[in-house]
């Protein structure tokens, strides 16, 4: 028994030491002591970070080993499936993942949560059914728009469907304040993804084609979704529909859908345009640079957003949040760009000699990935304000997406991968500028 007490005391001391260290850094940046809300936020961040770290490490191994074993061409085909699936997913889920997270986490009231979740499930079922029917009927035309073959297109539709279920189930889990359980399922996702991939390349796909990465991704989405439904959300699978909530959810989801445009375009549009103007091999190389820069950033960003959005949704005075963001931005650039540059170099070397390392391209991707985080901070804060915030947020979102599209079409044929990265940098700067100006209209 004394051993257990010492262990508990050690754990408490370690937590206090960690909080004191973080508080020192916080005071240096924001010139004020951490509040109780901030401490709770950071503790959740640390807890969830463990699960996300496991998932990210396993997913990164999956991506790097897959790119190294398959080579740029087959890896590029897998990347095209991901990109097309992301666009196809939009009309299926219609932003309902963000909507259910917003209104379920806003107030921890059981009856309200039950009605919101049940209504969301019905709305997603309807939107997904209609979308899948359209995508199958017009598959030839839509595949032509994406510049991909029929087999890649069908894989994209299946992947999008699995992703929709994954998005909705994990959003509900986060909304009902099961963040630690969410972290566990993230780790499960990474484990299933990597384990099934290794199984495929050693036993089922000796030719080492794109299917050895596509099938595991769908399988991982499906397994995690089924487990969440069985253990946590099956009680919400009821035909309980509230028309008032349906209107609110649909309105928020619509604006959230528009808000998803820059997040969808910053990677996936680049891949599709490179496929159109260059080669599938170049798509694979572009995807390796993305994994080495945006993928590294996504580890920390993913943990942060999981805790940040539900937390900031409860704040009425968003001006306080914007002031903290303004103080944080210089540190993100000063520390972020060189750190990502070094990590990017290491990851690209691990990918192998088939993926050329270019200093200028690495620097452009490092800058664009830091700008993505800066833009994301403003984007999430606007979105947390509800429909009014989403309307303002979408001005920046549309500007970012349009800029990325126009510059991508103009720069990629001329500068290749550097053109794609430059388009990202310019579009994020435009989006950040728009949201920075509009922030004063958020109370």
Image (tube, rainbow, N blue to C red):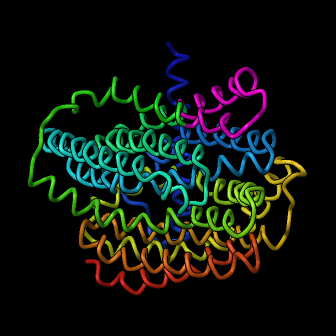
Q: Is residue 57 above or below residue 317?
A: above
Picture residue at 76% right of the left edge, 71% below the top: 363
Q: In percent of the image, x 45 and y 67: which residue is there?
A: 261
Residue 88 image position (x, y, % from top left): 45, 53
The answer to whether residue 130 is above or below residue 339 is above
Name the residue rendered at 50%, 64% in the picture.
Answer: 263
From the viewer's perspective, tell me whether residue 411 is left or right of residue 126. right
Residue 416 horizontal/vertical position (percent): 75, 73
Does 388 appear above or below 130? below
Q: Is 134 contained in the magenta span?
A: no
Answer yes or no: is residue 428 visible: no
Dividing the picture into quadrants, the one containing residue 294 is: bottom right
- Residue 360 in the image: state x and y as whole percent: 81, 74
**Horizontal arrangement in the rendering, residue 94 relative to residue 324 (left or right):** left
Residue farthest top in this picture: 1
Camera-side residue: 294 or 43?
A: 294
Instruction: Look at the image and give the residue range highlighted in magenta.
Output: 188-217
Q: Is residue 319 left or right of residue 277?
A: left
For this rendering, which residue is in front, 35 or 90? 90
Count of numbered labels shown in the rendering: 0
Query: Can residue 1 be seen from the camera position used here?
Result: yes
As for residue 206 lying within the magenta part, the answer is yes
Q: Quadrant of the C terminus?
A: bottom left
Q: Main secondary structure of the magenta part?
A: helix
Of the pair 433 and 19, the residue shown nearer to us: 433
Residue 423 horizontal/vertical position (percent): 63, 77
Residue positioned most to the right: 353
Q: Quadrant of residue 341 in the image? A: bottom right
């Amino acid at each position: 028994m004394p051993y257990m007490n010492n262990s508990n005391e050690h754990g408490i001391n370690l937590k206090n030491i960690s909080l004191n260290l973080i508080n020192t850094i916080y005071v240096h940046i924001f010139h004020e002591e951490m509040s109780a809300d901030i401490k709770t936020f950071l503790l959740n961040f640390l807890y969830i970070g463990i699960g996300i770290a496991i998932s990210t490490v396993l997913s990164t191994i999956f991506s790097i080993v897959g790119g190294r074993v398959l080579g740029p061409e087959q890896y590029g085909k897998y990347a095209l499936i991901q990109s097309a699936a992301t666009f196809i997913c939009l009309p299926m889920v219609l932003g309902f993942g963000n909507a259910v997270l917003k209104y379920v986490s806003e107030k921890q009231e059981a009856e309200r949560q039950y009605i919101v979740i049940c209504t969301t499930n019905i709305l997603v079922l309807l939107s997904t059914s209609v979308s899948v029917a359209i995508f199958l009927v017009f598959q030839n035309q839509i595949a032509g728009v994406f510049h991909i073959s029929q087999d890649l297109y069908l894989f994209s539709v299946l992947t999008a469907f699995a992703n929709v279920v994954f998005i909705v189930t994990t959003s509900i889990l986060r909304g009902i304040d099961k963040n630690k359980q969410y972290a566990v399922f993230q780790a499960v996702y990474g484990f299933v993804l990597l384990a099934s991939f290794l199984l495929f390349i050693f036993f089922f796909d000796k030719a080492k084609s794109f299917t050895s990465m596509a099938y595991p991704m769908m399988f991982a989405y499906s397994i995690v979704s089924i487990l969440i439904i069985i253990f946590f959300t099956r009680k919400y699978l009821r035909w309980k529909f509230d028309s008032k909530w349906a209107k609110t959810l649909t309105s928020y989801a619509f604006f959230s859908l528009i808000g998803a445009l820059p997040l969808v375009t910053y990677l996936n549009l680049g891949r599709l345009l490179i496929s159109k103007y260059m080669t599938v091999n170049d798509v694979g190389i572009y995807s390796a640079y993305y994994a080495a820069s945006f993928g590294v950033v996504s580890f920390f960003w993913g943990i942060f957003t999981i805790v940040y959005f539900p937390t900031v949704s409860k704040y009425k005075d968003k001006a306080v949040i914007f002031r903290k963001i303004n103080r944080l931005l210089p540190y993100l650039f000063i520390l972020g760009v060189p750190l990502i540059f070094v990590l990017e170099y290491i990851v690209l070397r691990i990918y192998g000699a088939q993926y050329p390392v270019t200093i200028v391209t690495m620097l452009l991707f490092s800058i664009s990935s830091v700008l993505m985080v800066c833009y994301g901070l403003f984007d999430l804060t606007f979105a947390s304000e509800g429909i009014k915030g989403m309307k303002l947020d979408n001005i920046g979102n549309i500007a970012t997406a349009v800029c990325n599209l126009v510059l991508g079409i103009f720069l990629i044929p001329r500068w290749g991968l550097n053109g794609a990265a430059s388009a990202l940098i310019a579009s994020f700067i435009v989006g950040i500028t728009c949201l920075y100006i509009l922030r004063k209209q958020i109370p």
